[in-house]
Image (cartoon, rainbow, N blue to C red):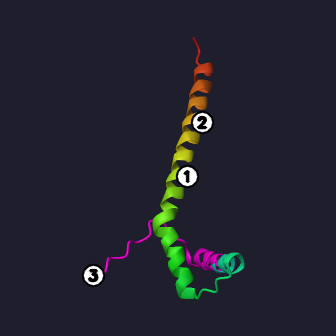
Amino acid sequence: MSRAKKEPILALDSAQEQAALQLLKRFLAERFELQLGSFEVQEVLDLFAREIAPYYYNKAILDVQAHLKDRFESIESDLWALEKS
């Protein structure tokens, strides 16, 4: 029984994907002496896109939220300082 392949939440444009594939292929060859074909490297990249990338994406969203919260609090403080009594 075959499971349906989960689509990646995040996708790269064609040039980014090709660069990522080359980087991954070179890394695996240099670090682990694995000479994988394009199909196998694509499978590894797809795994990362489906299963790992969302963790990094969500972390980035949380970081931006925290940064914006701090920034808005600073702006609010600045506006209170400008208020005339």
Do the CB atoms of the residues marked 1 and 2 lie less than 8 Å apart? no
* Residue neighbourhood size for the residue with mark 3, other residues' Cα within 10 Å, grouped as few (<14), some (14–19), many (≥20): few
**Disc nearest the viewer among 1 and 2:** 1
**Disc nearest the viewer among 1 and 3:** 3
**42 and 27: which one is in front?**
27
Q: Which residue is mark 3?
A: 1
Residue flagged by tag 3: what amino acid is it? Met
Residue flagged by tag 1: what amino acid is it? Ala
* Residue neighbourhood size for the residue with mark 1, other residues' Cα within 10 Å, grouped as few (<14), some (14–19), many (≥20): few
Residue 80 x %, y %:
58, 21
Q: Which residues are magenta?
A: 1-24
Q: Quadrant of residue 21?
A: bottom right
Left or right: residue 6 compared with residue 53: left
Q: Which residue is mark 2?
A: 71
Question: In the figure, 74 relative to 33: above or below?
Answer: above
Residue 8 is a magenta residue: yes
